[in-house]
Image (cartoon, rainbow, N blue to C red):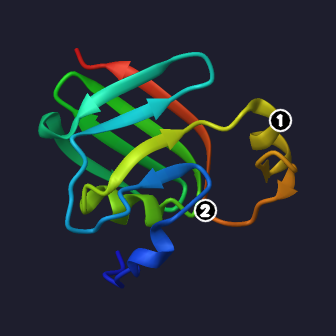
Amino acid sequence: MSTTAIPASAWASEDWQLETNADLKPAHLVIQLRRRAHVFPWMRFVFAEGDNDQVRIAFATHTVTVSGHGLAALLAALAAQQVVRLIQPTENEAKFGVRGPNAGRYTGPGISEITVVPNK
């Protein structure tokens, strides 16, 4: 496992939003799925683990699994608790690798799927 630090400027993505003020920690994390949203308070955050292809985020009541590419940047932002929102792209955005209103090709780190499962 590499211990190379990822600069904060590289944490950004079209698929997640970060707190813009590095001195502030957001109170909660919003998981925006295609048809529903979940809000988890950071005070219930347990751990996050993963690699470039998949990240697992554990809260006291639920586990969130994020699949995609370049997710090491997301993991670094989660470790700093600077993520405000994770956004699951539409099916076409995920399938064709495009983002935004002009449907431009997106090559940065990205999410293809998010699942939220209650802990047992």
Kindly identify which numbered label has been placed on residue 109. Answer: 2
Q: Give residue 64's quadrant in the image.
A: top left
- Residues 54 and 116: in front is 116
Q: Does 33 appear above or below 67?
A: above
Taking the spot 44% from the left edge, 32% from the top edge, the residue there is 31
Task: Tell me where residue 2 appears, x and y as whole percent.
Answer: 36, 80
Q: Is residue 38 left or right of residue 28?
A: right
Q: Position of residue 3 (x, y in %)?
A: 31, 81
Query: Label 2 sits on what residue type?
Result: Pro
- Identify the residue at horizontal 76%, vertical 31% (top origin): 91
Q: Secondary structure at mark 1?
A: helix
Q: Callout 1 environment at 10 Å: few (<14), some (14 to 19), or many (20+)?
A: few
The disc at residue 22 is none
Q: Of marks 2 and 1, which one's residue comes earlier in the chain?
A: 1
* Between 52 and 9, the one nearer to me in the picture: 9
Residue at 86% in and 46% down: 96
Vertical side of 32 occupied by 94: above or below: below
Q: Position of residue 90 (x, y in %)?
A: 73, 32
Q: Residue furthest front?
A: 21
Name the residue tied to disc 1. Answer: 92
